Image (spheres, rainbow, N blue to C red):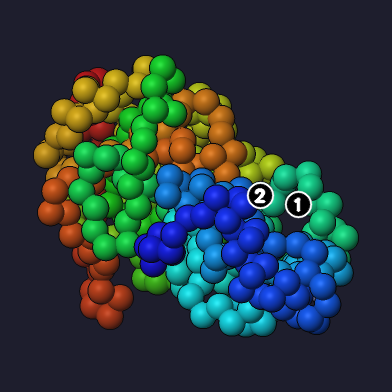
Amino acid sequence: MKSIMEKLLTRTEFREGVFARDDHQCVICRAAGQDAHHIMERRLFCDPGQLGGYFLGNGATLCAAHHIQAEETTLSCEQVREATGITRIILPSHLYDDVRYDKWGNQIEPNGTRLRGELFYDESVQKILAQGGVLNEFLPNTRYQRTYHLPWSNMTKDDRMLEDVSQFEGQEVVVTVKMDGANVTMYPDYIHGRSVKPLAGQDSGMVKALHAQIRHDIPAGWHLCGENLYAKHSIFYGTLPSYFLLFSVWDDRNECLSWDEKIDWAQMLGLTPVPVLYQGLWDEKLFRALYQPQFRGSDMEGYVVRLARRFSYGEFRRSMAKFVRPNFAAGRHNYHSVLELNELAKETELADGEDK
Ligand SMILES: [Zn+2]
């Protein structure tokens, strides 16, 4: 949230302020400045209070040649900041403070490989990355994005809130139970948790075995996201329909399939979707009263709302949001102790649950 502290400028103030601070010289080579460059792309700054990313700390004067290199990302954000004397990194608020990014918001891993960010498939971005010769640095894996809280949710440290929910109004949405497990992403040839490191941990055997069974049916370039509920975190589940519940399916353009398409895929792959609380038009009044302390015999952490239609990776934070109940303390199971396990429903309990 540090980034929000700096004053947001107008486009003209930004340009004039950046040039004045840098004496109208390219911060890299001291040639005459041509461009008041956005260190992080302006389109990444979408939240109110950050719109356009016109912060002095997100600007640097560059000559034409260095401007091209910065756009191609062969000149890194860190190099530009350092040459400019910027010590406080300004990031779009939905990105993570402890992660490195290139100008276009693609995550850079410690070994230099990159993950496709929300602007990766943008035509102009593809062109400039190709021109820079850096496309071969990208992994096919994608990090699961931060889900923003609904305004009536209960936030903890580092969470982000959607200040405006108008994008949902008049739209068909699906509300599902927020499950308290571990986030898992499956590709045809890879499986990872919330970061893109290989999945490890005592609780991952079941979900890895499941992946081995279905992976040949996942189309090339696609991925599935769901919750691994094998081990208990903060909430004990005694009647789970499955240890892995599917919440989204993403295609080879990193677009999230519509809810109905996802249901079709769940059936084809033999997977169970997350439980649905509501499907229909957005209804804020209803949703504000939707939280049920108990759901099918388990505590309920909260719920997740998504647009029923397809949306792109870049639209994620305006297409999904969550409610977390008051005083929910997210827990992690202790990897050094014996796992406490959740339990599957017996056939009869499952049938009863489905009828409701
Ligand atoms: Zn220069």
Instruction: Give the SS element for disc 1.
Output: helix
Q: Are marks 1 and 2 in contact (CB under 8 Å)?
A: yes
Residue situated in front as seen by the camera: 290 or 190: 290
Q: Earlier in the sequence, mark 1 or mark 2?
A: 2
What secondary structure is found at the residue carrying circle 2?
loop
The front one of 124 and 273 is: 124
In the image, residue 259 sits, relative to residue 93, either above or below, namely: above
Indicate left or right for 105 with 243 as reference: right
Point out residue 243 in the picture as x, y percentages from the top left corner: 35, 49
- Residue to which mark 1 is pinned: 125
Q: Confirm if mark 2 falls within 8 A of ligand 1.
A: no
Q: Residue at x 42, y 38 (%)?
A: 320
Residue 32 can be seen in this image: yes
User: Which percent across, then down, holds residue 329?
Assistant: 18, 59
Please indicate whether residue 128 sits to the left or right of residue 331 in the image: right
Location of the N terminus (image quadrant): bottom left
Q: Quadrant of residue 292?
A: top left
Out of 33 and 191, give the one closest to the viewer: 33
Task: Report which residue position mark 2 lands on.
Answer: 119
- Within-10-Å neighbours for mark 1: few <14, some 14–19, many 20+: some
Determine crowd level at label 2: few under 14, some 14-19, many 20+ residues with C-alpha closer than 10 A. some
Dividing the picture into quarters, in which one does residue 261 lie? top right
At x 66%, y 75%, the residue is: 22
